[in-house]
Image (cartoon, rainbow, N blue to C red):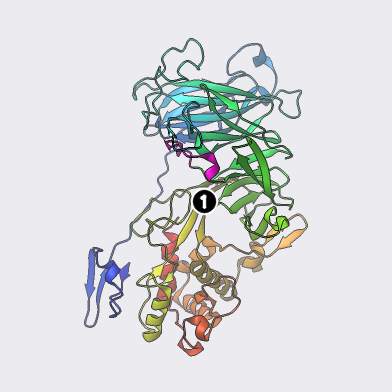
Amino acid sequence: SAASGGTGDGSDQQDSSLTYPLCVADESTLRLGIIDDIQKLHVTTHKLGMTPRRVAYHEAGRVICVGAIDGNSSSANGGDGGIMQGESNMGNCVRFFDDTTLEEVDRLDLDPFEMILSMVSATLTVGSDETAGEGDGSKRRVSRPYIIIGTAYAYPDEDEPTKGRVLLIQCGGGGGTDGNAAGDDTPMADAGAAGEGSTMSSALNRTVRIASELIMKGGVYSVCPFYDGSLLVTENSKTRYCRIIDGSLKVVGAGHHGHILSLCAQSLVSPHAASGPATSDDERSQIAIVGDLMRSVSVVQYFPKYKALEEVARDYNALWTTAAEMLTENIYLVAENWCNFVVLKRNPKAAAEEVRCRLETVGEFNAGEMTNKLMSGSLVVPTASNDGFYDSRGALGSGDSSPGGFTGIRSPKKAKKAAAANSNAPMKAVVTIGSRTLYCTVDGSIGSCLGLDGPTAAFFCALERCMARSIRPVGGLGHSEFRAFVAEKRHHPSRGFVDGDFIESFLDLDRTTMERVVAEMNEDGRWETEDLGASSVPSGEGSGGRSKDQKAILMVEDVIGMVEEISMSH
């Protein structure tokens, strides 16, 4: 994609350090450009021979962990429990594959009737090396990577599981950082199964072992990495705070009760962020969200001083939650079983207590498929065009975080003034992305949800709106009707979302239809509204001092540039 030459006002000085491998000259113009990176998603298939239930990648051990149901054996471990009937006693196992060759490294068989409900790879703090006091005599935490598995015993005579386990598994030969390699001198070196001996082996002969286990009084539906190398564990209708103490995983303090079924828990803590200098737990709010099977999402906060986990806010709408993810500390993305996405917002600084404890619905969208997994991440490797705009949890990074839109110098007001001076000059597309979230559906689809800033979202909302008005829908089903939030008797128009598949179909339109859509956008005018909530085009002083006749005019190439830019971001 070629970048146009400078505007003559010295505004391109910040791009002077860039190297342009592409130069194109004609009689009147010299164009300097860069060649965009082409990224392709590579898929490798490996036959398991059994039904997978959960999967996680353990970076420290360089293994892919797959929890599966072995339908070929009546019992994973043999014994008297293996002669029971039906699928209820199919053996559950965890298989470990090399992340490069996909060769099986090891296998761990679970007990009869034991089912895998959750699995995550995370770095946990070893119990004795946590914060020492409230003064400046804090120590450096020692942390180690583990694979954490939550299970439940599904006995045929029980409607709800009354027993489960949280397993901490170590993988040998994977190395580690900051003292993460487990040796015989660690408190947990002898906590594994008896008779296994030394299980830490070389990278060519890796094995796994159970380092610790915690017996729970219910099924462990979700395991979530939490602050300072701890864990949040959802057990039936309860949420527990756990951490390693004296070499064993233990429940600390009073948990939170009151859910119908605590299906999922999420926090903003990176799974591998436990190591580093220890700080006081009271310096920041330790919050997480818990998705209930029938009662939407609640926000819980852990108070280290009282060792208590309390609910501080909740959504009072009835949602059958299937997955949830924290986009920021106060913005949450929720999927429910009627194939809808819902965005909830918390307002902790509100003056009224009633507002602080209630989650507001700010976005609704019908995805068309039921989503059963949400997680922070992206399928695209960061490149020069998007590097620096986001961190691993989706927050704006330390790079150039100016608002998106059209600009050659990443300043919307100056770019619009330059466009007004020369309406024929093409404008450089800049798409600013915040959170990046992947979702998986029961139909096997993998999709991406991208957080957009105000100007970028305003532009794509205008494009979506004008495409829906200009393009005849297939089968007479309008786009707004297709994407409307529908759940039982509730029917709401879509809001707070932009349909990425729909706007990217702009590239497949013929030139005549493109020009009709762009003309509709220029007539609509709201594509340059920086406040997404505004209902009309700002004019006069509210539009950077331009009158209505001086507003920037879109060209087809401008819209194509924006759509191509967003299409390369997922």
Q: Give above or below for 214 relative to 498.
A: above
Residue that protrudes farthest toward the top in the picture: 195
Magenta span: predominant SS is loop
Stretch in magenta: 270-283
Image point 50% across, 47% down: which residue?
Answer: 376
Q: Give above or below for 74 relative to 134.
A: above
Q: Which part of the image, by quadrant, shows the N terminus?
A: bottom left
Q: Give above or below for 201 relative to 333.
A: above
Element class at badge 1: strand
Identify which residue, 416 or 310, lies in the foreground.
Answer: 310
Q: Quadrant of residue 372?
A: top right
Q: Is residue 282 on the magenta stretch?
A: yes
The residue singled out by tag 1 in the image is 437
Residue neighbourhood size for the residue with mark 1, other residues' Cα within 10 Å, grouped as few (<14), some (14–19), many (≥20): many
Image point 73% across, 56% down: which residue?
Answer: 354
Residue that protrudes farthest toward the front in the picture: 135
Expressed as whole percent of the image width and height from the top left, the position of residue 178 reads 37, 32
From the viewer's perspective, tell me whether residue 554 is left or right of residue 149: left
Q: Which part of the image, by quadrant, shows the C terminus?
A: bottom left
